[in-house]
Image: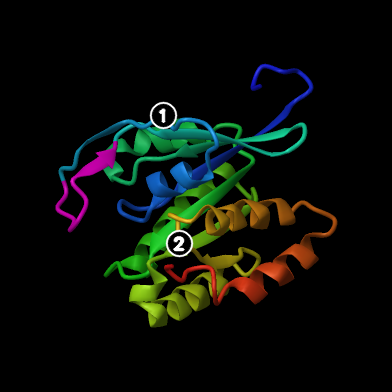
Amino acid sequence: MANDPALAELKIVVAGPMGAGKTTLVGALSDTEVVRTEAASSEAMPGKDTTTVAMDYGRRCIQEGLEVAFYGTPGQDRFDFMWRILARNAFGVIMMVSADAADAEEELDRFLATYEELLGGVPTVIAVTRVDLAPEAFDRLSASAGACYPTIPVLPIDPRQTDSAVLTVEALLAQVDSEGSEVLDRLQRQEAMIFRVA
């Protein structure tokens, strides 16, 4: 339980532009009922009629004595005041971007710079969604991010699949784990498979 003094808790922020899959990822990761705050979207986006206006919140016990709280942020700039609020005391950031977004590289750069300012050098993972629709874009995103942020892993994921979503958390933990390099090696071997849709 969250109020158990013997239970450690990590706070992870799930950030990125609108439509990247943040709400879906929090839902896939959480083993409790997710708190969502959605309203009708003011921006036109195919297949997306609502948007997060405050946060998505979920929790997952990843091992005995260690629980992770996930805070999904709004993607629209008009709610950017929530980014600062939700970033407080965060252990790490899962930065999401959709590979098939027209401005994916620019948005990823902008959000990475924003959270670098908010949080400094906390563990960060870039999670790229919809790679099956734009596989060549993943290569560009990975190269672009690697040039500016060479220590940040870039993973293609399917946020609807729990196993795929959990890899983002493992990659964050690997950055502070003494055996982290072995975990990242395993992630890299799996990355060609984790965005496939069953």
Tell me where the magenta segment starts and ends, as one range.
43-52
In the rendered image, residue 3, in percent from the top left (x then y), is placed at 66, 16
- Which numbered disc covers residue 117? none
Q: How many marks?
A: 2
- Magenta stretch secondary structure, dominant: loop
Residue matched to label 1 = 35
Residue in the picture at 67% in, 34% down:
67
In the rendered structure, which amino acid carries the disc numbered 1?
Answer: Val
Q: Where is residue 52 in the image (x, y as percent from the top left)?
A: 31, 38
Task: Give the numbered dot on residue 158.
Answer: 2
Q: What residue type is labelled 2?
A: Asp
Q: Specify few, some or many for label 2: CA neighbours under 10 Å numbering under 14, 14-19, or 20 or more.
A: many
- Compared to residue 151, the image places residue 57 above or below, namely above
Counting other residues with Cα less than 10 Å from the Cα at mark 1, is it few (<14), some (14-19), or many (20 or more)?
A: some
Q: Using residue 174 as the reference point, say whether residue 116 is left or right of it.
A: left
Quadrant of image for the C terminus: bottom left
Q: Is residue 1 left or right of residue 82?
A: right
Mark 1, secondary structure of its residue = loop
User: Disc 2 or 1, which lies upstream in sequence?
Assistant: 1
Q: Is residue 92 above or below residue 164?
A: above
Q: Residue at x 37, y 33 (%)?
A: 81
Which residue is most to the right?
178
